[in-house]
Image (tube, rainbow, N blue to C red):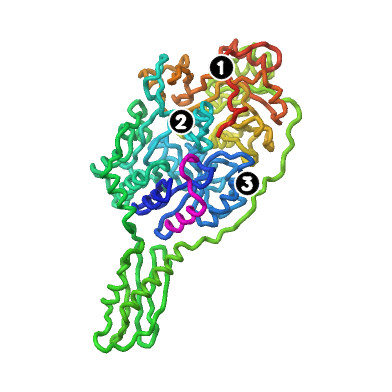
Amino acid sequence: MLELLSPAGSMESVTAAVQNGADAIYLGYGDFNARRNAKNFTKEEVAAAVSYCHLRGCKVHLTLNTLLTDRELPGAAQVADEISQMGVDAVIVQDLGVVRMLRQVAPDLPIHGSTQMTIHSLDGVKVCADLGMSRVVLSRELSRDALEYICANSPIEIETFAHGALCMCYSGQCYFSGVIGGRSGNRGLCAQPCRLKYGFNGRANEYPLSLKDMSMVRHLKELQDMGIACLKIEGRMKRPEYVAIVTRIYANALREGREPTGQELQELEQAFSRQGFTEGYYLDQKGADMFGTRQEEDFPKELYAKARATFENGENRKEPVQMYAWLRAGQPAQVAVEDKEGRLASVTGPVPEAAVNVPLTAEKVEGQLSRTGGTPFSCEKTLVKVDEGLSLPLSALNALRRQALEELSRQRTALPERRRGQFHEGVRFEDPQEAPDITVSVRSAAQVTPELLALKPTLLYLPADEGAAHPDVVRAAQQAGVPVAALLPQICWDRELDTLDKDLDALKELGVTQALAGTLGMVRHALDRGMEVRGDYGLGVYNSQTIKELRHMGLKSVTASFEMRLSQIRDLSKALDLELIAYGRLPLMVTENCIVHNHSGEHNCGDPALLTDRRGTRFPVVKAFGCRNEILNAKTLFLADKLGDVQHLGLRTMRVRFTTETPQECVQILDRYQGRGRYQLGDYTRGLYYRGVE
């Protein structure tokens, strides 16, 4: 049966989830998880939670799913060692450097790939398997057919979200909170700017980025039949009553193999919703109906009181056991208990005496053994053998039952024997001493002019579809001595690979052998096609271990996360050539929903739409591969007058990233970055390179 994974933001939520039927819980510990502003667990609380859960047949997964700096990795290694020895069942990870560290420190601790890894294709899943992961959490945007295809071909377990909040952006690719407010979602401190008002035509009068919560409770049998291993409920920031209600409804529906009742659906909505729920992504029915906001209402007191009673009033969860007893003349009484996993605990007591009045019967012994009372066990079956004419005090039988259950409890909560290792940063690579070269990326082939090519950038990143549609531009670049690399789409589902491959085949015919990939799935796909792969910002290069892991995969170069400070980039050990985005409108979101179409009912892929916030700031919205959107920053990153600060970071290249610029502006800007022109932006940003993120 499907594993049901529930959120636990507090010890109360642990109890709420377990007592209402969760098969596993996930929680955060310390500063290295995607809910750093939650009340995360102390070391003692994690140990207590593991013991409490394991006794009741529930697993514990711990989130270690943020991007970490080199200075933070030793602290994360200590956490990893602690949780492995505490018996945590799996750790949920985003950062490839953390994966590398875990293999050293806790090689026996199972690793699950977080949804923050943006795994949305079979190629991405296979990379996670190659990295030693046993499970991966897929992107929430995937449809039924996409999930089914991946499950049918995956070498590892697949987990998917079933209930709770939806991010507007693909998880792991959102920089909105970080760039605008300095609180990075990739670092566990998202400020949720998507829940605020925005609009078009200069007015912030809508909620075009606020999705309703998802609810898959009507599709549990389908998900189980397609091979999903685990369903995840979102909500570590929510109250324990919410956890209790949602867990109970999903657990009951799964256990009983049925659809939810009307009453249960109503309770889910009462517990928390944003104007109802959506199944839009799963049903492949995107659009305005998927959006909603939280209505300010009082908590449903009666429902919450009922929910609280489920985890405050004793044991509502009972693990099935079988009890055995042997009472024979002249031999010590023996009682044993066995759980469904096959653990067996056996104890012995006093020797039965000959009965003076009423002899002990098997039925009487069975009755005493079945009285598991306030324990987390339920006796489902008894097997008793009693010789005739014997007597044993009931108090002795009760004591034997208690001792057997206590011994079984010790077995169920016993800590696993796991290997322990040390975290080694490894060899440090020397930084290049020469000044970095300049690469150029464009959004449109029209931005590539003879004047731009005459400035001879080291490399031209051209979107694969644009290059295939404009072979003359590719040839012109090559004739000008400017190599071309295919800029691969950030998001590309399995069903879209044929379209991409046709473009790549066309580019291969033109002699293009390099590709820039921003997700693990695209990395794998390009490598399998024999291309020389460079890593883009979407891979989350935040520490030296990640660079080493990507080198091991076979990449030629990587791009530093633009959420890092320049000083942090300088301190990276460059196992691969490192590139810095030095100019351009930074990407804030890539969205599966087309917000332009949702607003106007039309697909307008021409001039960028301008999304306006409450302060009047306007963010360009441009078309992305597959009828998706990319939301760009309102201000343009500009470092042309700060190149002295960039020269000594150990970079091989810095990238000038053109998105909404005119062809003439592209020439002027590249000329300025090459140290000649006088082009100056009127309104610009230094990004996060100086101020950093939390």
Q: Secondary structure at mark 3?
A: helix
Query: Label 1: how many residues lie within 10 Å, few (<14), some (14-19) or many (20+)?
Result: many
Q: Disc 3 marks which amino acid?
A: Pro
Residue 74's tag is: 3
Q: Please tell me which of labels 2 and 3 falls first in the chain.
A: 3
Real-space Cα distance between discs 2 and 3? 31 Å
Whether 648 is drawn above or below 121: the answer is above
Q: Kindly check if marks 1 and 2 are in contact, taking CB atoms under 8 A apart as contact.
A: no
Residue visible at 65% across and 23% down in the picture:
439
Residue denoted by label 2: 169
Q: Is residue 177 magenta?
A: no
Q: Disc 1 marks which amino acid?
A: Ala
Q: Secondary structure at mark 1?
A: helix
Placement of the C terminus among the 4 image quadrants: top right
| Magenta-drawn segment | 35-53
Tell me, yes or no, if residue 550 can be seen here.
no
Camera-near label (2 vs 3) is 3
Residue denoted by label 1: 445
Q: Is residue 44 magenta?
A: yes
Camera-near label (1 vs 2) is 2
Q: Disc 2 marks which amino acid?
A: Cys
Q: Residue furthest right?
A: 433
**In front of the other: 646 or 299:** 299
Q: Please tell me which of labels 1 and 3 falls first in the chain.
A: 3
